[in-house]
């Protein structure tokens, strides 16, 4: 039996074995979040930290550089490595990681995220309707095949947001929304586990589709602004996270 055959015929629930760098990164982030290495403290020296994490120094350097790029750490030559204030200095990679650590999220995290979405989505949606109304209509037709499950709604809603940025022909919006993909797909199933939330989005898809057919740019903007604001209110009422 070949390796490919084994993978195909074996247990499909198996996950790839984590590499040492991935394990070390997870342990170090967890130590930061749990306060073992508090914000603005300094990490131990390279040799000691490698022993603590159970990796080689070369693997540790790889992990530290990766975390520095995301804004977890501040590395300066000749100085101890500082733990950043990731809420003020972090980048999108920090958001994606935090979405996998729901017990570490502050109470205002979801409202803040939805408020940021409220600021962007009406603009790129109206741009999409202005530039490619037929494509928007075709995209939203996919709602008719949706299964009433949190996962299906999450994946479809992500597809809608992503494609709307592309149809809007603004590369900056595309890059920003792409940066939220992992974060969104980690959190959206919680929201869409509520039947009323699924219906809320379904009503929006139908109304937006009609606006696209009519090439009503202002209506598409208003619809999106309203649904994003209502989603924010929804989260407050459900008391999730």
Image: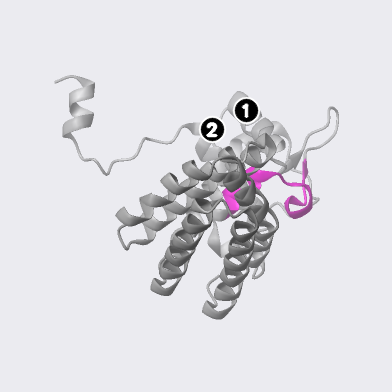
How many callouts does the rendering have? 2
Question: Residue 230 appears in which quarter of the rendering?
Answer: bottom right
Question: Residue 151 appears in which quarter of the rendering?
Answer: bottom left
- Checking the image for residue 80, the label placed there is none
Q: Is residue 53 visible?
A: no
As rendered, which of 163 and 60 lies closer to the eye?
A: 163
Q: Position of residue 229 (x, y in %)?
A: 63, 69
Q: Position of residue 233 (x, y in %)?
A: 60, 75
Q: Position of residue 212 (x, y in %)?
A: 52, 52
The reply, left or right, for residue 65 in relation to residue 59 is right
Residue 5, above or below 231: above
Residue that mark 2 sits on:
21
Residue that mark 1 sits on:
62
Residue at x 18%, y 19% (from the top left corner):
2
The question of residue 89 being in magenta is answered with yes
Tag 2–tag 1 contact (CB < 8 Å): yes
Most distant residue in the left direction: 1
SS under mark 1: helix
Residue at x 83%, y 32% (from the top left corner):
76
């Amino acid at each position: 039996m070949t390796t490919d055959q084994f993978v195909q015929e074996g247990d499909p629930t198996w996950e790839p074995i984590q590499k040492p760098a991935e394990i070390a990164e997870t342990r170090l982030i967890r130590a930061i979040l749990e306060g073992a290495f508090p914000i603005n403290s300094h990490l131990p020296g390279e040799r000691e930290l490698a022993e603590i994490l159970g990796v080689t120094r070369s693997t540790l350097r790889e992990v530290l550089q990766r975390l520095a790029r995301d804004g977890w750490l501040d590395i300066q030559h000749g100085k101890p490595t500082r733990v950043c204030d990731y809420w003020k200095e972090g980048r999108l990679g920090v958001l994606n990681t935090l979405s996998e650590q729901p017990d570490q999220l502050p109470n205002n995290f979801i409202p803040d995220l939805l408020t940021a979405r409220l600021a962007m989505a009406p603009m790129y949606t109206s741009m999409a309707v202005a530039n490619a109304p037929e494509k928007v209509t075709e995209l939203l037709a996919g709602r008719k095949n949706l299964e009433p499950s949190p996962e299906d709604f999450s994946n479809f809603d992500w597809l809608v947001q992503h494609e709307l940025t592309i149809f809007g022909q603004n590369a900056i919006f595309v890059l920003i929304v792409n940066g939220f993909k992992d974060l969104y797909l980690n959190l959206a199933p919680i929201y869409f586990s509520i039947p009323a939330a699924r219906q809320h989005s379904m009503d929006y898809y139908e109304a937006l589709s009609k606006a696209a057919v009519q090439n009503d740019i202002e209506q598409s903007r208003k619809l999106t602004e309203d649904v994003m604001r209502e989603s924010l209110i929804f989260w407050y009422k459900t008391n999730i996270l």
